[in-house]
Image: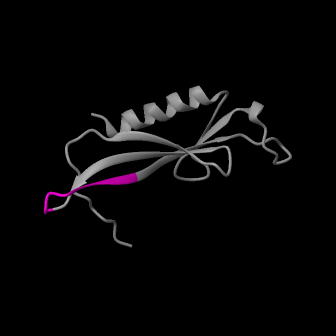
Amino acid sequence: MVAIKHPHTRDAPELVFDPSYAAPLVNVYVVRKAKYRTSKMYQTREPLCQIRASYDGGALLDGNKGYVVVRNAFDDLRYFDDFDTAKIYVHSLFALEYVG
C-alpha cells in the first residue's frame, strides 16, 4: 500500500484528545494543516496513541488500577497511576516527534 504524502504547511501541529463514548478510552491525534495546489486548506489527522483505563486480572475494568498508553504495537505500552501523568507522557511524545 502506497502512503499518501500531504503537502503540510509550516504551521505547528496540534495535539487533540478525543474521548470515546463507548469505553473509557481516549484517542490522541496529531492534526496538521495542508494545502492543495489550488491553495485550498485542509487538515490531516494522524493517530498518535490511545490512553485507556487498566483492567484487573479477571479482565474487568477497574478505574483504580491506573491507565495505559498504547502506541504502535501491543508490546509498546506504558503504565501510569493516574490520567494526568499519562497525559504528560503523551505531551512529551508529541514534543519529541513533532515539535522542533
Asked whether 52 or 97 is in front, the reply is 52
Q: Is residue 31 above or below residue 100?
A: below
Q: Is residue 41 above or below residue 88?
A: below
Residue 44 lies in the magenta stretch = yes
Residue at image coords 23%, 51%: 8
Q: Looking at this rendering, what residue extends furthest in the right direction?
A: 58
Residue at image coords 41%, 37%: 94
Asked whether 72 or 6 is in front, the reply is 6
89 vs 36, left or right, is: right
Colour mode of the rendering:
one colour
Locate the C terminus and report the quarter of the image it occupies: top left
Q: Looking at this rendering, what residue extends furthest in the bottom direction?
A: 1
Residue 68 lies in the magenta stretch = no
16 vs 58, left or right, is: left
Rendered location of residue 9, percent (x, y): 20, 48
Image quarter of residue 10: top left
Rendered location of residue 62, percent (x, y): 79, 38
Image quarter of residue 91: top left
Q: Is residue 94 above or below residue 43?
A: above
Which stretch is magenta? Answer: 37-45
Asked whether 75 or 98 is in front, the reply is 98
Q: Looking at this rendering, what residue extends furthest in the left direction?
A: 38
Residue at image coords 13%, 62%: 38
Locate the N terminus and report the quarter of the image it occupies: bottom left
Q: How many marks?
A: 0
Rendered location of residue 98, percent (x, y): 33, 40
Residue at image coords 81%, 41%: 56
